[in-house]
Image (cartoon, rainbow, N blue to C red):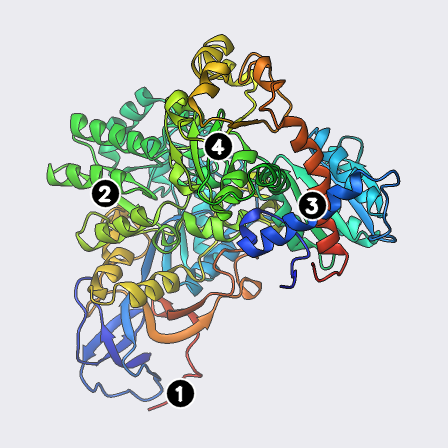
Amino acid sequence: MIVLKKARLFDGQSLGDEPVDILIDQGRIGAIGERLKVPEGAQRLDLGGKIVAPGFIDLHGHFRDPGQTWREDIASGSLAAAAGGYVLAVAMPNTEPPLDTAALVRYVRERGAAARGALVIPAGCVSKGRRGREMAEMGSMVQEGAVLFTDDGSPVRSTHLFRQAMLYCQDLGVRIMEHPEELELTGKAQVNEGRCSAISGMTGFPETAEVLGVTRAVALARELGCPVHLTHLSTARALEEVRLAKEEGLAVTCDVTPHHLVMSEEEVLKSGLSGLYKVNPPLRSPADLAALWDGLWDGTVDAIATDHAPYHADEKDLPFQEAAFGIAAYECAVAAVLDRWRVNHDHRPLETLLTALTSGPARILPLESLPLEGLGRLVQGGQANLTVLDLNRVGRVDPLQWRSKARLTPYQGHSLRGWPVLTMIQGRVVFSALEEATAGG
Amino acid sequence: MTWTHHSLLDVDSLSREEMELLLDQAGHMEELLDRPIKKVPALRGKMVVNIFFEPSTRTRVSFELAEKLLGADAVNWSAAGSSTKKGETLRDTAWTLEAMGADAVVIRHGMPGAPWYLKSKLKRASVFNAGDGAHAHPTQALLDVYTLRKRLGSLDGRRVTIIGDVLHSRVVRSNVQAFTTLGASVVLSGPRTLMPREVEALPATYEPDPHRAVEGSDAVYLLRIQKERAEQGLFPSEDEYHRRYGADRELLARAKEGAFVMHPGPMNRGVEIASVLADGPESLILEQVRSGVAVRMALLYLCLGGGSGS
């Protein structure tokens, strides 16, 4: 039994002002109320006004398992995600081999369930081998626990296949998460098309490549009446296409990443073209960055998803063009967003950010088939999957101390304010950075 | 003023005063080139490694001459015949060079940012960027401003038009900064398919019509057009390029009277420049080459010689 004393409760929608106590018993929220009595033998954690929220959900993480476990594996990624405040993380299927069969999906689900941090659950490929030609066995993968379908790392290469797959998985209750990118426009691209490409002389990812990826998915969703999720949107114009689709009433959802919310192409230039900042989609203009925040505040953005992309240092510590695409961030992603919110946006409601980490992503997943109950909500009687946030904690990012296998990140050395300090899954503490808990009454 | 730099990655690290100090120093160095015995012992005992990951003749030879004329020991690390081809990382190459005791590394690399990367891995040695991808070529820019400044006295309020493949040019990116640092303005021209989307970031303005772009210019600077750009579909043919953008007498006549013609070399005669201009009295092209040795001598002297400049 654990009693969380003096918590500010975020229930998935609104943030309470008055501190409450939360009793956790047998993996469930036994009671929520003012000045709860701490039962004999229960552990008491004094939160002193820290926020208690439903456990954070990440729709987009790269666990590199199977096949690339020198970068990360499910055990290390799970601990890293938990330390970042996440109770659940969706593993992308661009592994080696790609997660395109029921057996591979089962492998990830079983490893994910056995891991000691966040629960890791698999997304399956849309196409066999992620090659974009033939449909993968999506029905069988759903039976083994796949919660999204994506060829992430790439868009679904064939529009015909995309259309068929969208129709086929409509009855499976699992939606496609599309990586929107028109590959014809991004062949050798390295950085944002704009100031960064102009100054660096490197080939740019034009905004149009992302816009075409989005409009293709939106057109299919409109024609077929199917839901679709667009991941890691990075440009103002692509976000505007989603805004219009939502106004039209289409079941189109989207997420943005922490790095696109806090870094722009200016950081790439300032770094002397450091490979640490290389990511697809690229860090965009400051105007795009501002538009992503606007999209959060007006509800266009449904979720913040990390796109945690760990690599071995030897794959990132290279001149820009030779470095791999991707930013590792599990252990500081939430802090990076909270820090920026505090600096630039604290006149905006914190609830919106917390929603994008909890009930927002929960709505995109097939909740009834998840191993955790009641994700995205925090109510009496519900399962105790929760995250404690300390908005005032200041910490410096040091990837050498990470649970993730990644040792390089552009956040290195950043001093950030606002950190997850405790993560609990089914009443079990899987991560804690709180002062030594005081036992007894 | 005191010279504080030990390396040169791009010209944007130099203030106007620093750049002028360096150009004045280059003037002294150029006088040396006229002496019967050109060599001075200013950098005796210093080891400079020239490491070129891309083929280059004039820049490499120019650096090598500058190093030798100052008495440094110049070593050419040929990337083609080295372990680079066997897959050694630039990091390991950097540490190997330092372990051998190199005082300075002159690097040409196809990857933008490679000299910055090299610098970040070296504890002690100086790094000189001899061109990285389409990103920067600071010594070319310095020799260009040196050459034109020598002819015009000052670049304040002057106007330079650069025509050609801006998109793939490391020369233009450094040149725009160097010219604007010294008070000149730069107009770019050429087909839109060979322009970055945001030329104002360089910072320069764009005028698609080369005949209008050269109006009022003190110098017309042509960039090399590589054959494969037409094959990549960036423009239809070299012939059409020459008709629309190639520099000839008619184009030069639209510039300011007495305007100079410049080119970083090697030239494609009959494509970006007609021979009548390349070999004409307005051409500074060979002076640019000569300036290159003097400017690189001045740079090496200031950065490695421990001198406090003038």
Provide the chain ID for the residue under circle 3.
B
The location of residue B251, given as percent across then percent down, is 45, 18
Compared to A387, does A3 lie above or below?
A: below
Provide the chain ID for the residue under circle 4.
B
Q: Quadrant of the N terminus of chain A?
A: bottom left
- Give the amino acid at mark 4: Asp
Labels 1, 2: one chain = yes
Provide the chain ID for the residue under circle 1.
A
Pointer 3 or 4: first along the chain: 3
Q: CA distance from mark 3 to mark 4?
A: 21 Å
Pointer 1 or 2: first along the chain: 2
Q: CA distance from mark 4 to mark 1?
A: 79 Å
Residue name at image x 17 percent, y 77 percent: A17
Q: Is residue A379 left or right of residue A77?
A: left
Name the foreground residue: A436 vs B244: B244
Q: Secondary structure at mark 4?
A: loop
Q: Is residue B78 left or right of residue A11?
A: right
Residue name at image x 22 percent, y 62 percent: A377
- Give the amino acid at mark 3: Gly
Judging by the rendered image, the residue that carries numbered circle 4 is B218
Labels 3, 1: one chain = no
The reply to whether dot 2 and dot 3 touch (C-beta < 8 Å) is: no
Judging by the rendered image, the residue that carries numbered circle 1 is A438
Judging by the rendered image, the residue that carries numbered circle 2 is A253
Q: Secondary structure at mark 3?
A: helix
Q: CA distance from mark 4 to mark 2?
A: 56 Å
Labels 1, 2: front one: 2
